[in-house]
Amino acid sequence: MSGSLRLRLFAIILAPLLVISIGIGIWRVDEARDTAADLYDKSLLFTALAVSRDVALRDGDAISPETEKLLGATAGGPVRYHVYAPDGVFVTGYATPPVPVSSISSQNEAFAYFDAIDKGRAVRVLRLKYVTQIAEFSGSFTITVWQDADVREKFARALAIRAFASIAALIGTAAFLVWFGVHLGLKPLVELEEAVSRRNPEDLSPIQRAVPVETQGLVNRLNRLFAQVTNSMEAQAAFISDASHQLRNPIAGVRALGESILTAKTLKTAKERAADLVVAAARTGALAENLMTLERARAASHLAPVDRVDLNVMLADVVSATPCARAPVTFHRATTPQVVAADETMLREAVKNLIDNACVHGGETLTRIDVRLTGTPEHVTITVADDGDGVDPADFPTIRARFGQADPGQGSGLGLSITEAIAKRHGGRLALNAVARGFSATLILPRRRA
């Protein structure tokens, strides 16, 4: 995901707070409505009790000034009242009480709350019944008090607005603190970026500055990347140096042969030198091709294998396509299919190099070359062995190196280097073995790359 890391962290931290705050806000609105309803219902009850007391004390003629004041401004809005005698006779108050919007549970309850419509306005009503005597009337009197429902809605909205204002203030404060904290927390990354940007492009030395634990892994990976780039650049420089050194003499020889053709005294001499030129050019071309193969194998060492290769089939084909003029090449196949994940082209080149190496360097005593395939649950091994002159184990480091040869010969000295690079590309290795007679090289490959 692209974009600002600071904004991402800010959103990740603040988003849950906003969701929680919205939930709390909705809960507070419901709580405000319930609180307003409870408060105003109790206010209606206190007003009804005050009216009933005054009616009883004054025989229904009037109510006290205190009650009048209570009726005029109870909990933020006027309250109206109506009193019925036991026989339905109007005693005092407003002429007609509101009619319930829906039926109430029982007309005989001591008191009951309900919603009603009065002159087109929604009101909240309390009907209170009590037994007393007023003037000549004795029995159950009914007192009804009511108030506009809009009053309690306004009160509930005021409570909700105050709650939302408090929540908004808290969210604003939290947002500021989160932004400040994220900015402060990312400061080491910003400083690291500035430090890296100030570096010379050729400076690939490890980053040594102190960083938080959470970014230590990133710095370690950068340092490993710097080291890999440095090694790659050094390897390329070494390859260019080796290639130019090794190609200088063959190219000079080709040029000299070409010039000698021009100065030849006779046609026969010119043809002989032309034949030598063809051979020299072929050797130079083979050397250049081996150099390119070695570099491709080395440079591609990080790539994953692309083919599933049955080594029994592949090795039989390679052996038949790579004859040796000095000795027969025999393939000893495995008793079961040996399948690996590999770059088949590179693997063919590795085995071909081992066979060519045995053929070229086997010497006069060479009578056979054996290619043997074996396998275990974890690895497969390809061994190319000959019965030729052999190699002293002390010379193994020499023949592993680029252009290294135990004795000067016709080869380029790159065969084992190429094979070893291909083995490493596949997560394997090349083992050189000292045998009683001849020489043996084993290519060991894992069935699956780690």
Image (spheres, rainbow, N blue to C red):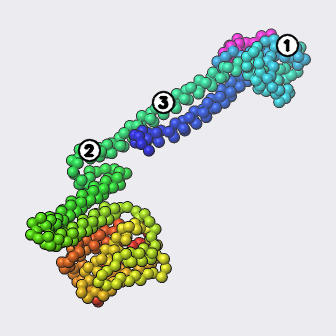
Identity, as a three-letter code, of the amino acid under mark 2: Ser
| Residue toward you, 386 or 391 | 386
Q: Is residue 209 above or below residue 66?
A: below
Identity, as a three-letter code, of the amino acid under mark 3: Ala
Q: Is residue 284 left or right of residue 3?
A: left
Callout 1 environment at 10 Å: few (<14), some (14 to 19), or many (20+)?
some
| Residue toward you, 76 or 33 | 33
Q: Nearer the viewer, mark 1 or mark 2?
A: 2
| Residue toward you, 260 or 224 | 260
Instruction: State the image quarter where residue 23 is shown.
Output: top right
Examine the structure image and report whether residue 62 is included in the region drawn in magenta. yes
- The residue shown at (30%, 88%) is 367
Q: Secondary structure at mark 3?
A: helix
Q: Secondary structure at mark 1?
A: strand
Q: Is residue 135 left or right of residue 300?
A: right
Please provide percent x and percent y for residue 133: 86, 18
- The residue shown at (78%, 12%) is 94
Which residue is labeled 2 in the image?
197
Q: Dividing the image into 4 quarters, which one contains the N terminus?
A: top left
Q: Residue furthest top?
A: 61
Which residue is labeled 1 in the image?
90
Q: For the residues marked 2 and 3, what is the alpha-carbon distance in whole angstroms? A: 41 Å
Which residue is labeled 3 in the image?
169
Q: Nearer the viewer, mark 1 or mark 3?
A: 3
Q: For the residues marked 1 and 3, what is the alpha-carbon distance in whole angstroms? A: 54 Å
Please provide percent x and percent y for residue 292: 27, 63
Please provide percent x and percent y for residue 416: 28, 73
- The residue shown at (43%, 41%) is 8
Callout 2 environment at 10 Å: few (<14), some (14 to 19), or many (20+)?
few
Instruction: State the image quarter where residue 411 is shown.
Output: bottom left
